[in-house]
Amino acid sequence: MIIPPSEDHIDVTVVRDVAVLTLDRPDKLNALTVAMRLRLAALVRELGTGETVRGIVLTGRGRAFSAGEDLKQAPTTEAEVHEAFESFHDVTRAILQTRVPVVAAVNGIAVGGASEITLCCDARIGTPTTEYFQPENARGLTISNATSLLLRRLVGNHAMRMVLGSPRVPSAEALRIGLLDEVVEPDQLLERAVDTVHAWTPEGNTTALHLALLRPLVAEVEAAFEREDHAAHEAWASGLLTAGVAGFWTNKETTS
C-alpha cells in the first residue's frame, strides 16, 4: 500500500499490517493546523475501511503527542472559528466511523484539542511522561471533538475539574481515573499499541460489528458537536476567544 507523501506533517507507516499515523511537527510540539486536521481525517477514512490494514495507531513525533491547536493560526473571523471547530469534529467523526480499532499511543503531553482527539479512540496507551492538559477555560476557548460527551463517558465527574480547573493530569492519575488504559515504557509504546490492534482483530473476528455497538451513538456525538459549536460562537461573539489568545501570546513573551 502506497500513501501519497504529505506536506501536512502527518507521517504514515505500516507496522505488522497496522497503520501508524504520526503527528510530525516536533519543533512545534506537533501543534495542529487546520490542514493537519483535514489530512488526518482523510487518512483515517482511507485506512479505516478494514480493506488494507487491521487497525490504526495515532501518535506524535518527539517529546509531545501534540500541543493542540496551533494558536499562531488561531481564528480571526467567525467563519474561521467554524472552520477550526469543524476540522476538529471531523477527525472525531472519521475515527468513530472506522471499521478497525483506533489506538492512541500518547507519547507525551496532549493538550486541548489534541487531548480531545484521543477521547474517541478505542484505547489510549501512555508512558510515564504522558500528561493531559485542558487549558481552554482560562484562554477564552471552549472544548470540541464531542468532549462534552466523551470525557464524561471515560472519567465521569473528573471531567468537570479537568475542564474548569485545567490541572495537568500525569500518567498515573490518568490511568487511575480511566483516561489512559495502560502505561508502558516509552520504547514499548508503539509495539504495545500494535499488539493491542492484533489482539482485537483475531482470525474470523466480528470486531467491526462490536466497534459499532460499543462506540457512542452518532446522534449523541452530533448533538455534542452542535452544543460545542454554539459555545464556540458565544466565546467568539463575547470577545473572550480573541482576548484569551492574545493573552496567551503576551504571557508567552513575558515568560520566555
Image (cartoon, rainbow, N blue to C red):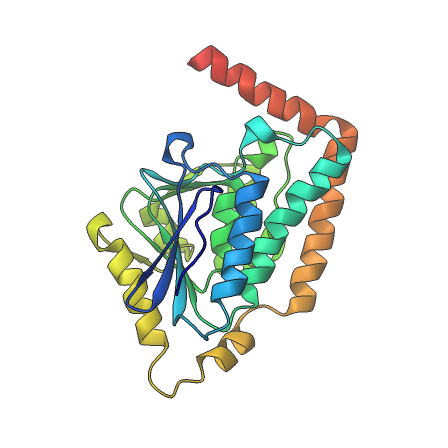
Residue 232 position, x and y percent, is 71, 40
Horizontally, residue 229 falls left or right of residue 245, namely right
Q: Residue at x 65, y 41 (%)?
A: 84
Q: Residue at x 65, y 30 (%)?
A: 140
Q: Is residue 207 above or below residue 144?
A: below
In which image quadrant can residue 12 be found? Answer: bottom left
Q: Where, quadrant-wise, is the C terminus in this rendering?
A: top left
Q: Where, quadrant-wise, is the N terminus in this rendering?
A: bottom left
Residue 248 position, x and y percent, is 55, 22
In which image quadrant can residue 100 be found? Answer: bottom left
Residue 145 position, x and y percent, is 59, 51
Q: Nearer the viewer, residue 151 or 106?
A: 106
The mark tally for this picture is: 0
Q: Is residue 37 above or below residue 94?
A: above
Residue situated furthest bottom in the rendering: 204
Q: Is residue 232 above or below residue 11?
A: above
Residue situated furthest right in the rendering: 237
Q: Residue at x 43, y 54 (%)?
A: 179
Whether residue 157 is visible: no
Residue 164 position, x and y percent, is 57, 39
Horizontally, residue 206 falls left or right of residue 74, namely left
Q: Residue at x 55, y 38 (%)?
A: 33
Whether residue 180 is visible: yes
Q: Nearer the viewer, residue 187 or 37?
A: 37
